[in-house]
Amino acid sequence: MVIKNVSLDIVCGITSNLPDTGRPEVAFAGKSNVGKSSLINGLMNRKSLARTSAQPGKTQTINFYNINEEMYLVDLPGYGYAKVSQSEKEKWGKMIERYLHTSKNLKAVFLLVDIRHDPSANDKMMYDWILHNGYQPIIIATKLDKLKRSQVQKNIKAIREGLKLGKDGIILPFSAETKQGREEIWALIDELTGLVPAATEEVEN
């Protein structure tokens, strides 16, 4: 996808009514220090539209990013390391669940995991929870630049086994530093949302 314009259109807190955007949506979930904001900024070709922070757990709302007036990237609150109370985390969980259950436009949920490590208990729980809510998570393995090339396939296999992914389960390695994997992620988003890049659209004579 060619990014022409992006904006943070809608921010939903715990008590907000969730919007019917009328456009295709893809959502991103992941624990608080996995590089979700960096991924979203990388996909949008922006440096700081999604706020990155050394302090995990900054995203405490559901953020809807409007891409080209055609679709939305939806940033879900991080889990795992955020320094908030258990009751607060449960409220976030209910908010995300409400979104997964009620969105008429959600086409896919991407779950981010750190490619350097085996999936954590939190990662496994989130994967199973997304499945339970009716979506087959697509895995984005972040921080690809932190690995030697020779380690990549071994670590991808460990993620596949750790999450009990089937043969059809998709894992897309990504680096926010080098943007490696960006095109593959966008190609899949285009396919899932039905937004064919303009360059490949057939022109009628």
Image (spheres, rainbow, N blue to C red):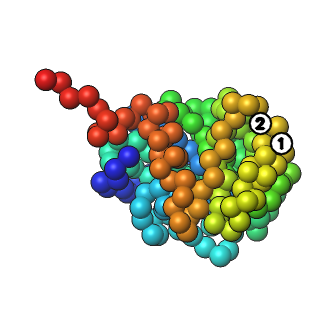
Q: For this view, does 171 lie left or right of residue 120?
A: left
Q: Is residue 41 visible?
A: yes
Image coordinates of residue 51 in percent, x first then y, are 53, 68
Q: For this view, does 42 lie left or right of residue 139?
A: left
Identity of the amino acid at label 1?
Answer: Glu
Please, what secondary structure does the residue beneath circle 1 have? helix
Q: Which of the 4 image quarters holds residue 103? A: top right
Q: Nearer the viewer, residue 15 or 203?
A: 203
Residue at mark 1 to residue at mark 2: CA–CA distance: 6 Å
Q: Which of the 4 image quarters holds residue 134? A: top right
Image coordinates of residue 85 in percent, x first then y, are 79, 62
Q: Is residue 168 above or below residue 32?
A: above
| Residue identified by numbered label 1 | 161
Q: Is residue 101 above or below residue 94?
A: above
Q: Are marks 1 and 2 in contact (CB under 8 Å)?
A: yes
Please, what secondary structure does the residue beneath circle 2 have? loop
Quadrant where the C terminus is found in the figure: top left
Q: For this view, does 29 lie left or right of residue 119?
A: left
| Residue identified by numbered label 2 | 165
Image coordinates of residue 154 in percent, x first then y, are 79, 52
Instruction: Identify the residue shown where x is 47% and y is 46%.
Output: 186
Q: Is residue 29 visible?
A: no
Label 1: few (<14), some (14–19) or many (≥20) C-alpha neighbours in 10 Å: few
Instruction: Identify the residue shown where x is 45% and y is 69%.
Output: 47
